Amino acid sequence: MKFCELIGDTPPDAEDSKAIRHRVIRSRTRQSERLTADGIFSNAAMSPRLIRKYCRIDSESEAMLERAMARLGLSARAYDRILKVSRTIADLDDSDAISSAHVSEAVHYRSLDRTYWT
């Protein structure tokens, strides 16, 4: 539970659970439609070959990801995981393309993983 929920101060622009559920269902449908021909149904199951096929990023995102990898000391495996998470964030955003904002969010999650779970 978030602190603002504990004190009863929910932000006015907060997305309700029904809207979130709808967005997640749409995202899972997008993934399934995109990946069914490859024999999988979710971004998490993508192989490195499929990551290269479905997780293309622009040069701005590449540069950002390269800096993050150097700063955080990330591996090739972490690079692939960030791309898969970026693809999922884009799907949740109903976007065909992965933007630098999606990559940035995925890197942020990865840095939190390294800070709190390693």
Image (cartoon, rainbow, N blue to C red):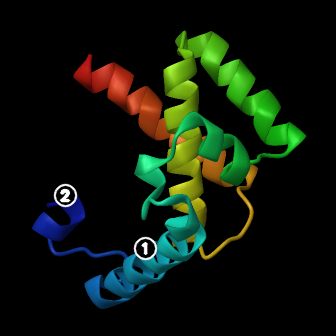
Image quarter of residue 4:
bottom left
What percent of the width, then of the height, locates residue 36? 51, 69
Can you identify the residue that label 1 sits on? Answer: 28
- Whole-number angstrom distance, CA of label 2 to CA of label 1: 29 Å
The amino acid type, in three-letter code, at marker 1 is: Arg
Question: How many residues crowd mark 1 within 10 Å: few (<14), some (14–19), many (20+)?
Answer: some
What percent of the width, then of the height, locates residue 115? 34, 21
What percent of the width, then of the height, locates residue 93? 58, 71
Image quarter of residue 113:
top left
Front-most of residues 67 and 57: 57
Secondary structure under the numbered disc 2 in the rendered image: helix
Say whether disc 2 or disc 1 marks the residue closer to the N-terminus.
2
> Residue at (44%, 59%) from the top-left corner?
40
Q: Classify the position of the N terminus by image quarter.
A: bottom left
- Would you place residue 73 above or below residue 21 in this image? above
Q: Is residue 107 visible?
A: no
Secondary structure under the numbered disc 1 in the rendered image: helix
What percent of the width, then of the height, locates residue 87? 58, 55
The amino acid type, in three-letter code, at marker 2 is: Phe
Front-most of residues 61 and 27: 27
- What numbered label is drawn on residue 3? 2
> Residue at (61%, 46%) from the top-left corner?
50
Question: How many residues crowd mark 2 within 10 Å: few (<14), some (14–19), many (20+)?
Answer: few
Q: Classify the position of the C terminus by image quarter.
A: top left
Q: Is residue 74 visible?
A: yes
- Would you place residue 95 above or below residue 105 in this image? below
